Amino acid sequence: MRKGQRRSNGLLRADAAKTRLRALETAMREFAEHGLAGARVDKIARKAGVNKQALYYYFGNKEQLYEATLENGYDRVHRQNAPEDLSAMPPAAAMRHLVEIFFDRVNELRDVVRLVADENRYKGRHIRSSSRIRQINEPLITQVRDTLARGEDQGVFRRGVDADQLWLSIVSISQFYVSNIYTLSHILGKDLDEKRALAKRRAHVADLIVSALRP
């Protein structure tokens, strides 16, 4: 293959990747707002600036597009939670760091939270057919397990804490606040989406998790 042909093929692949990503980002907004049942493929295609046939070429059908959007959503949440060396940090500080990063990500990516809520209406049917979503979540789960074990070994965390339950608490406490922020604001009569309220909640969640681990 000539050099010019290789360059041309590379540009085509790059353009295809950009088109696919643009379609996924548009699909995220549409599925988050309307759910799988209410979102329309032709509307996603139009807003993404691609034709409907291109979407079917990249993703197959509407449910496969929904599954790919879920994968992209989980990937966006956990991209900033990529494995890093936390061993230099004291266990309590490392655990706080993990909680705060996760809280920040779900707060920033509220469309993903809404999308996951919609998927639970289908009892996780599309997640179960994905080969990637468990892998995407695994680094954070491993970090929680490793940090917990290190804290137990150093005597700063109590023994007997179930690592999976700890991970579930980190995820559920953060996601519940974000997914219910408007109804909770009305009930308490205060704006929980305001910057200071978010910072206060973030600190409280981290304090709650770390305090629960102390001997």
Image (tube, helix red, strand yellow):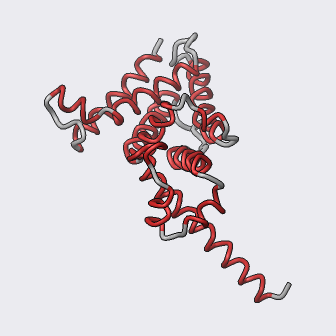
40 vs 105, nearest the viewer? 40
- Quarter of the figure with the N terminus: bottom right
The residue positioned 57% from the left and 50% from the top of the image is 62
Considering only vertical position in the picture, is 211 above or below 139?
above
Give x and y (percent) for residue 12: 67, 77
86 vs 31, nearest the viewer? 31
The residue positioned 44% from the left and 32% from the top of the image is 96
Return the residue found at the far right: 1
189 vs 167, nearest the viewer? 189
Question: In the shown orientation, is residue 97 left or right of residue 130?
Answer: left
Return the residue found at the far left: 189
Give x and y (percent) for residue 164: 58, 21
Considering only vertical position in the picture, is 25 above or below 78?
below
Write down the quadrant of residue 47 in the picture.
bottom left
Q: How many labels does the image show?
A: 0
Give x and y (percent) for residue 13: 68, 72
The residue positioned 77% from the left and 82% from the top of the image is 6
Considering only vertical position in the picture, is 139 above or below 108?
above
Give x and y (percent) for residue 63: 59, 46
